[in-house]
Image: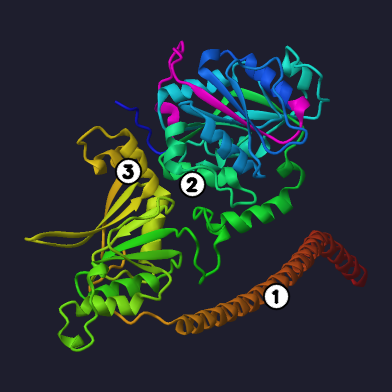
Amino acid sequence: MTARVRGNDYRVLARDEPLEPRLTVSVVVPAYGGQDKLDLVLAALARQTYPAELIEVIVVDNGSEPPLCLPAERPELTRLVRCERPGRAAARNAGLGAATGEVIHWLDSDVLLTPGAVEAHMRWHHAAPYLVVTGYLRFTEAPVPAELPSDLEAAFEPAEPHAWLVDLVERTDGLTDNPQRPFSLHVGGATSVNAALIKAAGPMDDDLVLGQDTELGYRLWQAGAVFVPEPAARGYHLGPTMRMRDKAPIDRVSHAFVADRIPAYRWLRGHPGRQWKVPYVTAVVSATTGYDEVRATVDGLLAGTVPDVSVLLVGPWDTLDHDRRAPLQDPSLDLVLIEGHYRHEGRVHLVTSASVDPAVPYTLHLPAGWIPGHDTLARLLDLARDEGLGLVNVLLDESSGGIVAARLERASAFARARIVAAAGEDLDDVVDEVAGVLWADGATYGFTAEAEPPQGRRSAYKERLAAQAEAARLAEEAERLRAQVAKWRDEAGTWRKSAVELRREVGSLRRRIAAANRVQPDLRSVVSSTLKRALRRKS
């Protein structure tokens, strides 16, 4: 039975101790010039502890002049192929096409692996057939030596760690704490992938200018991959990467392309109206129930707070005859109306079978006639994402005839389930194991069978303006109240000062009265004595 990982918590996997190697690995090294560094890379591969007969190395010369050659110190099963199409993605795809290993290990032509690095990768791949493993690189400014040192650490330290990767791993508990984008770990410098996963996900997209590693990592995630950071798989990168040198301009170029292909990068898709190559969610709706029901459901989806949605309307579109003599008697009139209404809507596709692009993260199966509320889809997506769920079943109606339900499926969870499921095993049960399944109440999430006219964009704009005006009024009122409170505080301070002064005056008066009280008995005695002497003299 194939081991089952829930989410990205690879800690449940048991790795063989000691390892009994049986899987073959193809190390793909694209290179353009840099013969001196390539010689060191191959020498480091020749010193790996993983069995040499299981390591194949494909060096791809990406149009170097003069052409690259293989040095004397290299793994026995090393081949050199040439790729004239420029670009790292094209070179890697050429190496991938020549590779025969059960595991593909991407390696840059300026990365020197420590002797146990490949073995550290392969321990994981022996534990499960759907892993992506990334090693820990350190970036050295040490001079490039003429020969590979016997002790890489002594030769290349001090060196800088792969800071963003270390930070990502640390703040997600090693990528096990429901990370939203674990595929970011797929970097080409020193990452290994099960070959079957790459076959399912497809090769690198060489239409991209930058960001090819991340985009392929995303498709691997969609294909069911688990991403594993392995500190024991260490290597030294000779000098900084291009991204380390020019992060801001590289991100600018990369984001312009990957936004269209990686829906998980929500912050790159802030525009409320545009469409993307890969939508965030695809809704599948049967078109065979009637024009009015289908239109209510589809319009509800298109009018919601998730603009990043596409709709597949499934129906026998290829059978329509479009009777123009008596259209009202056409038995397929409702289908004709649906086709005519949505034929030119860019987010709606008329299909004969529900084949969803595997790069789309979520698929909603929704019966026609059930209308989502304005924020329904967004709330369901939040629920699935925040809880890491693979399936959210939504109960729409229940009667003696059975239940009516919608389904929100996460593509990556179902892909994983298909990898690990035994023959005949219910796929939903496996999804529950690898991600989680939850039932939700349709009414609670805003589903209804009563169609309401969708809110127009201008109405929403006016409401937004009114809300902004109200927010500004409340902010102004809050500022006025803050000023009043500040005034009261100043007055209270003045009162406190006055109270202190009054207390001081009262204290002074009390002291004077006390002094006067002390003087009074002596004064009375003096007066009494004086009177008595005066009386005696008169007598």
Q: Does dot 3 land on a helix, a strand or a loop?
A: loop
Which residue is the site of mark 1? 487
The quadrant of the image that shows the C terminus is: bottom right
Which residue type carries mark 2?
Gln
Q: Indicate the secondary structure of the residue bearing disc 1.
A: helix
| Color encoding of the figure | rainbow
Residue 341 has which mark?
none
Locate residue 77, reporting x and y percent: 57, 18
147 left or right of 387?
right
- Residue 320 among magenta residues: no
| Residue receiving disc 3 | 436
Q: Which mark is residue 180?
A: 2
Decide if residue 104 is on the left or right side of residue 320: right
Graded by Cα atoms within 10 Å as few (under 14), some (14 to 19) or many (20 or more), the crowding at tag 1 reads: few
Q: Residue furthest right?
A: 537
Q: Which residues are magenta?
A: 9-37
Image marks 2 and 3: residues in contact by CB distance under 8 Å? no
State the CA–CA distance, disc 1 to disc 2.
49 Å
Q: CA distance from mark 1 to mark 3?
A: 57 Å
- Mark 1 vs 3, N-terminal side: 3
Residue 289, image x and y in percent?
A: 19, 71
Q: CA distance from mark 2 to mark 3?
A: 15 Å
